[in-house]
Structures are given as C-alpha cells and as structure tokens.
Amino acid sequence: KDIQYIYSTFYNKLELARFDSNLGKYVGYTEYGVKQANYWNSNPSEIARRRAQREAYCLHNIGIDYQVA
C-alpha cells in the first residue's frame, strides 16, 4: 500500500509528464506534457500497462529491498 511507482518523461532535463501509481493517472507539468497526459489518460490500456508495471517492478522486488541481513 505504501509503495509508489513513478514513471516520468523528460526532454532536455525538463520533466514533461509523470505517471503516479498513487493517483493512478498521468500528470502533465508543461503545456505539451498536459496534452500528452490527457491523451495517455484517455487510453485504458496505457493506464493498465503502467499499473501492471507497479506490480512487476515494485511488488516483485520489495522482498529484496527489505531483507534482514
């Protein structure tokens, strides 16, 4: 529940848009990024793909990061 997956898109060191698993959608930070975020958010398969990435990357590896030595 407390694991957050973030996927950010950058151009020229400027963050354009970001998918935040806590929000469950893309958020744009520039004019272009807002347009892209709206486009991606309107595509259910894109949102499902990013949510699946949280399962694949974060939840799969959580045991590795929190192992007691």
Image (tube, rainbow, N blue to C red):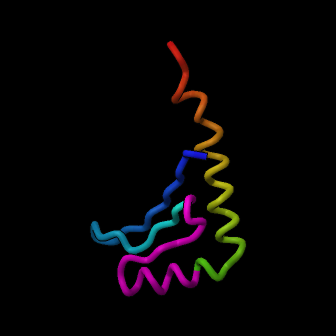
Q: Residue at the spot x=49%, y=57% of the render? A: 6
Q: Residue at the spot x=53%, y=53% of the render? A: 5
How many numbered discs, if any? 0
- Find residue 19 and report its horizontal and vertical position in percent: 52, 65
Residue furthest to the top: 69
Magenta-tinted stretch: 21-39
Residue 32 quadrant: bottom left
- Find residue 13 and report its horizontal and vertical position in percent: 28, 66
- Find residue 46 and report its horizontal and vertical position in percent: 65, 71
In the image, is 55 to the left or to the right of 18? right
Q: Is residue 42 magenta?
A: no
In the image, is 49 to the left or to the right of 20? right
Q: Is residue 26 magenta?
A: yes
Q: Residue at the spot x=60%, y=78% of the render? A: 41
- Find residue 37 and report its horizontal and vertical position in percent: 51, 79
Residue furthest to the front: 1
